[in-house]
Amino acid sequence: MLSLDEGTTGATAVVVGLDGEVRSTGYQEIAQHYPQPGWVEHDPLEIWSAVKLSAKEALLGAGVTAQVLGVATGIAGRIWVMWGDASGGGIAVTRSNKAVTKWEPVQKIALPKNTTAFYNAQGEGSGGPLDAFVDLLLGTNDRGFWRTHVLARDSLSESTSFQSGGKGKSAKLAFHATDAGDPLSGAIIVVARGSTVLARLKTDPNGHAAMSLPVGNRNGSLKATVTAPGYSAQTISVGLGG
């Protein structure tokens, strides 16, 4: 895990293993500017550069073999991270939650054919999705510029409970849509059996939505698909085995 801390005098990065032990650290100093007595200012571009340099130092010190391609700002304090190498056939991309304590499921992005090396990589994700810009080498000596658009990756979970009443057994399906652990409000969840749509739900501010349906007919599996602006659609299977 890579942890980033931007302080008053510098940016610190720490790589922690799955056992909780610190593997390596990186640090990059940030200049202080005093325009008048009692004031202190920082250059935002210098802060961003220091964050990237400290992260690279920590990762190299920990022996991380994947080439870190870039770090980009995301919406509402989130951070996009890209990494990979040409031999791996693509780059890995993920985005943090607002507190930068959890991460979305990693996405693997395919590269142009004949890519043999990466150079500079930058990104812009303050609007939600990531616009990634990468300088790369195609073949042996053909330099190229590659741009790709990456949607954020949400997650959908579901739990089923059963009730018996005068009209028979019914199932309550409770859904929870999240983005790296943060609730995803206003997302649309479509529940369907085959091509038949059973419900179209909208998540509340806590990312929750629910529905009930009779259990008498279980022919055909149920699927639930969550969609939201700026996110790729995710589909899960819904079990009624109660």
Image: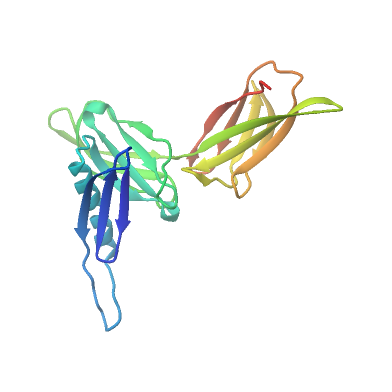
Question: Viewer-proximal residue, 179 or 120?
Answer: 179
For the point 62% across and 36% down, the residue is 175
Report if residue 122 is visible in the image: no
Is 200 located above or below residue 97 in the figure? above
Is 177 drawn above or below residue 171 in the view shown? below
Question: Which residue is the extreme one toward the bottom?
Answer: 37
On the image, the x and y values in percent for residue 165 come to 83, 29
Identify whether 61 is placed above or below 225.
below
Question: Outermost residue, left direction?
Answer: 141
User: Can residue 236 be seen by looking at this rendering?
Assistant: yes
Q: Residue at x 38, y 44 (%)?
A: 130
Q: Residue at x 22, y 49 (%)?
A: 25
Number of residue marks = 0
Task: Tell me if 170 is positioned left or right of 191 in this view.
Answer: right
The answer to whether residue 134 is left or right of residue 154 is: left
The reply, left or right, for residue 8 in relation to residue 230 is left
- Position in image of residue 236 (x %, y %): 55, 28
- Residue 158 point in image, percent of width and height: 60, 33
